[in-house]
Amino acid sequence: MSEVSNLLIVGEAGTGIRAHLRGKAVNALAGREPVLMLDCGRNHEHFCKLMGGSVVTLLTTPGGEETPILSTFNAQNTTPLQVFEFERASRPWTGLLPAPEVSFQRAPGLLVVDDVAEIRSRYPALEQLVREHLAAGGRCCLAGRTESALQPFVGICAPAKLVRFPSES
């Protein structure tokens, strides 16, 4: 396993948070851990392509239909990296995520959530997913724009290291 078990990262866009999240993902993959990233805004799609992972776009219709769409660029899926993209979820996603259970059955791995407030608004079961992932022996790295956005996860992720961006030196 990697250095710090769980991280809670606070900071605005443009402060290096996403680069830090990707670095944590690369370290986990180098340690042969699977990585599941939850994103809204296609921030990690190119990274996922470069790393040989898969992107699943979660589409919800105004009528409530939920459809996962697997990207076509990753037929070989050479690394255990999955990004679930919530940008096209016009309504909250209420079903199970289509594949993380399979991905994390062999090894719990790292769960990365970019902008917890945005993901929570589109995936209300986020707290439950984090709880279950940690209970199975996984680790998490959660990012939010404010400490209040991360507050619901402080107890769930304990012990966790809080990191502020830009870093206070």
Image: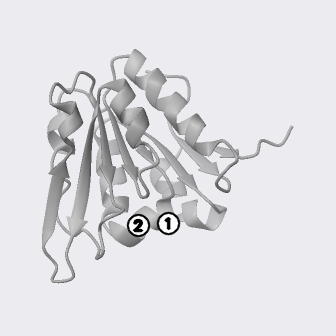
The reply, left or right, for residue 124 in relation to residue 60 is: right
The reply, left or right, for residue 23 in relation to residue 122 is: right
Residue at the spot 41% in from the left edge and 62% down from the top edge: 119
Instruction: Measuring from the top left, give residue 128's x and y in whole percent.
Output: 31, 59
Residue 107 can be seen in this image: yes
Choose top left, top right, bottom left or bottom right for residue 160.
Answer: top right
Residue 160 can be seen in this image: no
Instruction: Measuring from the top left, give residue 50's x and y in whole percent.
Output: 38, 27
Tell me whether the residue at label 2 lies in contact with that at label 1, contact meaning CB atoms closer than 8 angstroms.
yes
Residue at the spot 19% in from the left edge and 76% down from the top edge: 61
Q: Which residue is mark 2?
A: 120
Q: Name the amino acid type tagged 2.
A: Arg
Residue 33's disc is none
Instruction: Measuring from the top left, give residue 36's x and y in whole percent.
Output: 33, 40
Q: Which residue is mark 1?
A: 117
The reply, left or right, for residue 36 in relation to residue 21 is: left
Q: Give the crowd class for mark 1: few <14, some 14-19, many >=20 residues within 10 Å.
A: some
Choose top left, top right, bottom left or bottom right for residue 91.
Answer: bottom left
Choose top left, top right, bottom left or bottom right for residue 87.
Answer: bottom left
Q: Which residue is more in the foreground, 62 or 33? A: 62
Question: For the image shown, how many numbered marks are present on the structure?
Answer: 2
Residue at the spot 77% in from the left edge and 41% down from the top edge: 167
The reply, left or right, for residue 60 in relation to residue 15 is: left
Q: How is the image coloured?
A: one colour
Q: Quick one: SS at disc 1?
A: helix
Q: Name the amino acid type tagged 1.
A: Ala
148 vs 73: above or below: below
Residue at the spot 62% in from the left edge and 67% down from the top edge: 148
